[in-house]
Image (tube, rainbow, N blue to C red):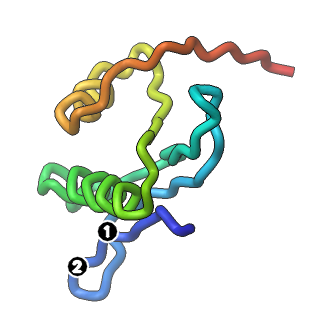
Amino acid sequence: MDVSFVAEIDDKMVGFVLAYLTYVREKVTEACMIQIFGVDPAYQRQGIASQLIQRQLEECQSKGIKLVRVMVEERDTQLQNFFKRLGFGRGHYIDYSKNL
């Protein structure tokens, strides 16, 4: 299932959201993971990112996917607030990483 989208204005790509489907521990359920998204700096602050994420959420809902996740850097309060405005809340898990 495709859950990635591109925003175009006048045949020019101005934004994108790349996501994939996976399974998560909670009740072994299918979830959509937002991997990366962005908007051309010349088109930022026009609601394009919000529209892309909202379109992605609608697509997931239409396919019966009940969980959408995104990882945000702990210090990036601007991005955290963006997702909070879209109805996302902090999850129950802490990400652990190891650089090799």
Q: Residue furthest right?
A: 100
Residue 80 found in image quarter:
top left
| Residue 31 sits above or below residue 44 on the image | above
Query: Which residue is nearer to you in this view: 79 or 27?
Result: 27
**What secondary structure is found at the residue carrying circle 2?**
strand
What residue does disc 1 label?
Answer: 14
Query: Which residue is nearer to you in this view: 32 or 39?
Result: 32
Q: Position of residue 79 (x, y in %)?
A: 31, 30
Q: Residue at x 22, y 86 (%)?
A: 10
Q: Quadrant of the N terminus?
A: bottom right
Q: Residue at x 58, y 54 (%)?
A: 20
- Alpha-carbon neighbours of circle 2 within 10 Å: few (<14), some, or many (≥20)? few
| Residue 97 sits above or below residue 33 on the image | above
- CA distance for labels 2 and 1: 7 Å
| Residue 84 sits above or below residue 46 on the image | above
Q: Are marks 2 and 1 in contact (CB under 8 Å)?
A: yes
Q: Which mark is residue 9?
A: 2
Q: Position of residue 76 (x, y in %)?
A: 37, 22
Question: Does residue 48 appear to the left or right of 2 in the view shown?
Answer: left
Q: Residue at x 38, y 53 (%)?
A: 38
Residue 29 found in image quarter:
top right
